[in-house]
Every structure is written in C-alpha cells, then in structure tokens.
Image (cartoon, coloured by chain):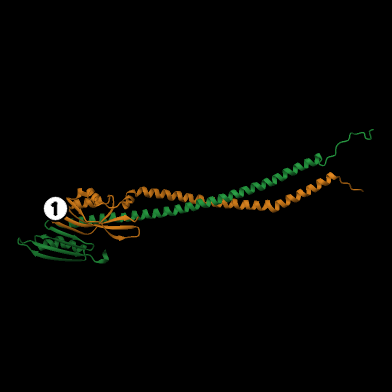
Amino acid sequence: MRHSFIKSRPKKLISSELRLVLSFFSVTLFMLLSTYGFLAYKTYAFGSSVKRYQMQTETLKVALDEMDVKISFIEKEASTSEKVFTANTVLKESIKNLFDLVPERITLSQAQLEKNALVLYGVTPNKEIYEFMLQAPLRSIFHRTYSSFYPLENGWYRFVSTNYLDDEDL
Amino acid sequence: MKFHISRQSLYLLILSLVLLLFVLLFAFIFLIPKGKEYRIERLEMKKYRVEKMQYQQYHDETFEKLKRLQSDHKRVITAYDAMFNAKRFVKLNKDYFVSLLLKPLERIADEDDFIVYEVNTTSRIDSPQSFYNFLDGINKSEWIVEVNFPIHFERDDKYIRSSFTMHVYNKKQ
C-alpha cells in the first residue's frame, strides 16, 4: 500500500550542489598551491642564477687580472725594447757623427768611446789643422778636452785627444 | 518567526568558512612572504646579471687589447723569450764583419722582469759603414740586444779592429 504520491529517492550525504561547491573549492586550492609552487620554484631558480652569475663574475675577474698582468708586461717589454732600439740608433748616429767630424787631412789610428769620454789617437800634418778642424768641434761637444802631441820623423804629429763629458749631461 | 537552516546549508557554510580561513592563513603565512622573496631574488638576479654582463664586456675588450698587443709586438715578445745563441748570432751577422768573435755570455743584472746578460765582442770590419749597418740590423734581430760602451776602434792595415760590449735582455721565466 502506498502512502505517498511521489516516488522515494535515496538520501545522499553530499548533494549535487555541495559537490559543485567542493569542486570550485578544489580549483581554488589548486590555484593557490600552484601559485606558491611557481613562486618557490622561481625563487630557487633565481637563487641558482645568482650563484652562477657570481661564479662567472669571479672567473671573469680572475681572467681579467691575468690579462692585465700580461698587458702590462707586454707594454713593459715593448717600452724596454724601444729604449734599446733607440739607444742603438743614437749610438750609430753618434759614431757616424764622430767619424764625419774627422777631416780628411787627419788620420785616426784608434778611437775609444766610453760612456762619458772619447779618446782619439791619430796623426796630423800640423798642430793648426788639428786645432781648427778637430779640436774646435770636439770642444763644442765635450766639457773638457786635452790634447798631446808627439812629433814624427816626417814632420807630422802623432796626437792623443782625450775628451770628457761631465756627469750632469749624461 | 522560526529560523530554519538545513543540514546541507550548514555543511556548506562551515566548509566555506574553513576554506576562507585556510585561504587567508595560507596567503599571509606562505604566499605573501614567498612573493616578497621572489621579488627580492629577481632583483638580485638582475643586479648580478648586469654586473656579470659588464665584466663580460670589459673582459672581451681587454682580451681584444691583449690579442692586439700580442700581434703588434710579436717579434719583441719572441725575442725576449729566446735564449741568446752565440753561434746563430755570428751566423746571422757575418755579412757585416770580416770576422766576429763572441766571448761567453755573462749574467750581469736581474731586473724586476728581465735578466740582462753581457757579451764582449771583438771583430774586424772593412769600413765604419759595416758597423752602422750592423747597428741597424741588430734592432731587427731575434734577440733584444743593446750595443754598449766601451767601444774601441783601431786601424789594422786595411781593416778596422773593433771591440764592443752587448747587453742581451731576456724575460725572467
């Protein structure tokens, strides 16, 4: 015997409305947690990048220091070699000028070049030629000039000319 | 008036309140501090990246400069590294002299980065021009050589006997 006009339905603990609400809640929780996860991962990744950049910067600094040392050494090598080459060129010009200074009538037998002195040995037809043509230019170059003469059998003179530069001009 | 609330609605209300509480707590305890940390780390990372890029640029420029210097002064660098070889020196310069004799190399000075050797030389030349040519040629030789005082020239029949000192510069190893 029936007591109701409608058909009985089974009672549920979670209704379909509640299930819908729960699924929305689940989506909310998922989004919250995934945002946190994303932030945590990116923070970790940034930290790793910072460490990597720090290491690369340190490596670059070391390489830069090494290259700076090499550069300054090459510059030093270049400047020292330049000084050496200049000294050789100046020496060549000095010797050339010295030999150009000697007139044709005077014959040199020896020349000693020191850092601050020049000693010349040779023969001259007479003292006047020596004094005007060799001693005068030597006097204009050197601070102190001394000459000695030794007469030869043929009337010529053997001479020794010693010339000094004072230290201040070196 | 009687206020009636169903069991389902009560569940819903409690669940919503729990969720709200959870969201608020989670946000304030975890999410917001993590967000701040993320922002700080990102700024830090950008700062270090810019610094690294600046160093990289400076490194590249310095590297270029070094390569250019090495290329420009290749001969000089090689010359400082080369140990003086008397036999080879005589062989390379024999055209300037009638005869050329070198005494053994003697270490005379230790500068900061260089070692200076001295070598005494006796030679015979046929004219002063040969000696000038030698001085020109020595600046292009395989070593860094400085001709030094004392220099002595003496007439010897049709030749000129000469003696001079040379300083050879080597890099300290």
In this view, the residue in front, A45 or B2, is: A45
Task: Give coordinates of residue B81: x percent, y percent.
Answer: 32, 52
Instruction: State the residue at coordinates (68%, 52%).
Output: B30
At a point 46% along the width and 54% down the height, the residue shown is A62
Residue A63 percent across, percent down from the top left: 45, 52
Name the residue tied to disc 1. B159
Along the line of sight, which residue is nearer the eye, A26 or B148?
A: A26
Place of residue B34 in the rendered image (x, y in percent of width and height, measured from the top left): 65, 52
User: In the rendered image of this protein, which colour is used for chain A?
Assistant: green
- Chain letter for the residue marked with disc 1 in the picture: B
- Is B122 left or right of A157, judged from the image as shown? right
- Identity, as a three-letter code, of the amino acid under mark 1: Tyr
Q: Report which colour depicts chain B.
A: orange
Check disc 1 and report its element: helix, strand or loop: strand
- Quarter of the figure that contains the C terminus of chain A: bottom left
Q: Residues within 10 Å of mark 1 (few under 14, many from 20)?
A: some
Q: Please give left or right for residue B44 compared with residue B162 in the image.
A: right
Looking at the image, the residue that sits furthest to the front is A1
Residue B57 lies left or right of residue B112; in this view the side is right
Quadrant for the N terminus of chain A in the image: top right
